[in-house]
């Protein structure tokens, strides 16, 4: 074999990859912490620390298996902070004769690596990351010729293809989807279980990142870093989930509460998105655990969890590769309002938003319904520019990588794709937020009022959204009812005026 340089990106920490099965003295691996990656958006400090620490741990493990590996730290003098410059410099310095990489999950890096390879004067090769269940183009082929890509039919195919929760050709317990049973508000605090937090002291790394001049957002407790940054720790989080949280995962999946930021959610997205864990091993582990504990855990919990991973997660990745780069430009409603400043500070009187935003700034985490039905819902109702929205979501969450961020944000949450991911926009008035938990009972606004002093902004903005987008939505068969209700309202004008007032004073809400 020719003397080969193999690139490992920061989200390619898959120790099970066939690359590492055998030691080859002709191969040198390369990992780099780079300003190009810390600076393309302003990231949460916990995210930068999490990635770098996980990368450093991964490098140790690869070396422990006997492989040669070059690691460029953010603070290293020879680090040129740019993928292309570093690789070209190392090829020259070490006389590498071939260059190989694993296919990146981001369009941006995919383009950059293709351009780099075109400019190199040596053989290059890309290989699969061996992480996802499907190849990049599977979803596009699966839905060839269809305008809407229905997640449910893709999900069922995955269940069959990978024999997950199947009883021969049929789904176990004779039903594919138990979503209807997974919508409760949490009424009893005593059900809550402690999350598995890895309280590591990473002060040295935080200081190193700060000294390098990387600009970040959010907060961190240097001596108490909570996220898993190795495969071993990731497996501990998975075990903890099976043993303590799975039992209530589905039931309270959509709950909103001030009592706890994590509820029964797994906190596994970072471990999976960096590939420390594979999606198949996660779902197989959960399925096996359920099979052994069927008397205690009902199928709705397990099916709900598995659907998120082999359904939504794989599906979003398929959408990304089917629709990029156009997807990143989509703005179906033509929204162009600036994101209010309080999204960066958490200073708003709206309790649902202050809870979700402050928690995100503090923990780099919010669960799905906070992202979709609180922050995302407000942004859509208020008509915020999807570019600003993407910057926020892509920066703030520990698990935010473009392929899964943008498809959730522009697609699922903002309907900026005009209905590729979802069949109708996810919007709600205060009613939904009130039903799902206790935010409204701690709020300065009144969820029962649409207009006047203290009326909840969600209520008037909800109708304003429908009113201003009538031409785009009225013909949607799943929405017609909303327009019939709006047109019958006696105080419609008053509600719309209230919304206008709130939009004008959006910074003061
Ligand atoms: P759990 O609730 O325990 O779910 C288990 C796993 O299912 C998750 O770890 C995740 O891998 C997967 N999953 C669940 N929902 C989705 C989904 N809609 N799309 C893809 N995978 C899903 N997820 C990210 O990984 N990165 C993001 O940047 C991201 N941005 C989002 C932005 C918006 C506006 C919305 C509405 C959702 C976003 N999601 C994103 C999806 C989801 O909210 C997170 O995956 C989840 O909250 C992560 O926490 P958890 O691991 O505790 O998840
Ligand atoms: Fe949110 Fe309105 Fe409820 Fe306040 S009243 S928590 S703003 S939904």
Image: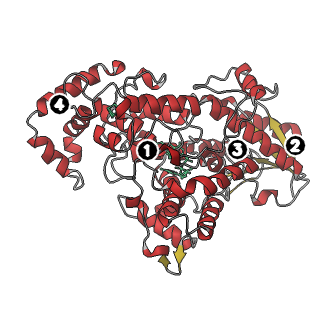
| Numbered circle sitting on residue 495 | 4
Q: Position of residue 16 (x, y in %)?
A: 75, 58
**Which secondary structure lies at badge 3?**
loop
Task: Name which quarter of the figure residue 383 lies in.
Answer: top left
Q: Which mark is residue 369?
A: 1
Where is residue 12 shown, x and y percent of the image? 69, 48
Report, in whole angstroms, how far the alpha carbon at label 2 lies from the one at label 3.
Answer: 21 Å
Work out whether residue 337 or residue 461 is closer to the camera in this orientation and state it: 461
**Could you tell me which residue is drawn at 10 percent across and 33 percent down?**
491
Q: Is mark 3 within 8 Å of ligand 1?
A: no
Tell me: residue 280, above or below residue 389: below
Q: Is residue 122 above or below residue 387?
A: below
Identify residue for label 3. 9
x 36%, y 19%: residue = 507
Which residue appears farthest toward the bottom when viewing the image? Answer: 168
Question: Which of disc 1 and disc 2 is earlier in sequence?
Answer: 2
Element marked by disc 2: loop
| Dots 3, 4 in contact, CB < 8 A | no
Q: Residues within 10 Å of mark 1 (few under 14, many from 20)?
A: some
**Relative to 491, is 242 on the left or the right?**
right
The residue depicted at 72 percent of the width and 26 percent of the height is 206
Residue 295 horizontal side relative to residue 226, left or right: left
């Amino acid at each position: 074999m020719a003397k080969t340089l193999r690139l490992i990106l920061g989200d390619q920490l898959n120790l099970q990859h066939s690359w590492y099965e055998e030691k080859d003295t002709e191969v040198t691996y390369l990992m780099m912490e780079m300003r190009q990656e810390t600076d393309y958006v302003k990231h949460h400090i916990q995210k930068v620390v999490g990635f770098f620490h996980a990368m450093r741990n991964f490098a140790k493990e690869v070396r422990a298996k006997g492989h040669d590996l070059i690691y460029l730290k953010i603070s290293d003098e020879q680090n040129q902070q740019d993928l292309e410059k570093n690789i070209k410099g190392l090829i020259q310095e070490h006389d590498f004769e071939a260059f190989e990489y694993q296919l990146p999950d981001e369009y941006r890096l995919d383009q950059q690596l293709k351009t780099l390879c075109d400019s190199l004067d040596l053989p290059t090769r890309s290989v699969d990351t061996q992480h996802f269940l499907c190849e990049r183009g599977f979803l596009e082929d699966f839905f060839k010729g269809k305008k809407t890509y229905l997640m449910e039919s893709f999900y069922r195919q995955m269940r069959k293809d990978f024999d997950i929760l199947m009883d021969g050709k049929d789904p176990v317990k004779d039903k594919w989807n138990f979503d209807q049973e997974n919508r409760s508000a949490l009424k009893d605090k005593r059900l809550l279980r402690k999350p598995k937090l890895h309280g590591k002291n990473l002060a040295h790394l935080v200081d190193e990142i700060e000294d390098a001049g990387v600009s970040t957002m959010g907060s961190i407790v240097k001596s108490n870093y909570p996220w898993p940054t190795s495969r071993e720790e990731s497996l501990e989080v998975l075990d903890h989930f099976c043993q303590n949280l799975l039992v209530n995962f589905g039931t309270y999946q959509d709950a909103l509460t001030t009592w706890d930021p994590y509820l029964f959610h797994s906190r596994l997205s970072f471990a999976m998105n960096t590939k420390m864990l594979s999606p198949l091993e996660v779902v197989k582990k959960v399925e096996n655990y359920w099979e052994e504990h069927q008397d205690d855990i009902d199928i709705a919990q397990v099916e709900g969890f598995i659907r998120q991973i082999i359904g939504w997660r794989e599906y979003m990745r398929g959408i990304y590769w089917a629709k990029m780069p156009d997807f990143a430009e989509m703005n179906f409603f033509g929204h162009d309002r600036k994101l209010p400043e309080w999204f960066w500070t958490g200073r708003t009187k709206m309790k649902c938003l202050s809870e979700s935003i402050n928690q995100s700034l503090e923990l780099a985490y919010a669960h799905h319904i906070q992202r979709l039905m609180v922050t995302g819902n407000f942004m859509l109702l208020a008509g915020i520019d999807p570019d600003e929205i993407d910057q926020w979501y892509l920066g703030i969450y520990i698990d935010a990588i473009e392929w899964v961020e943008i498809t959730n944000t522009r697609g699922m949450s903002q309907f900026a794709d005009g209905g590729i991911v979802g069949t109708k926009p996810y919007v709600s008035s205060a009613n939904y937020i009130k039903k799902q938990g206790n935010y409204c009972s701690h709020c300065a606004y009144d969820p029962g009022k649409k207009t006047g002093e203290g009326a909840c902004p969600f209520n008037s903005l909800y109708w304003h959204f429908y009113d201003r987008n009538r031409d785009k939505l009225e013909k949607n068969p799943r929405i017609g009812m909303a327009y019939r209700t709006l047109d019958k309202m006696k105080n419609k004008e008053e509600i719309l005026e209230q919304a206008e007032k709130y939009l004008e004073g959006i910074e003061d809400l």
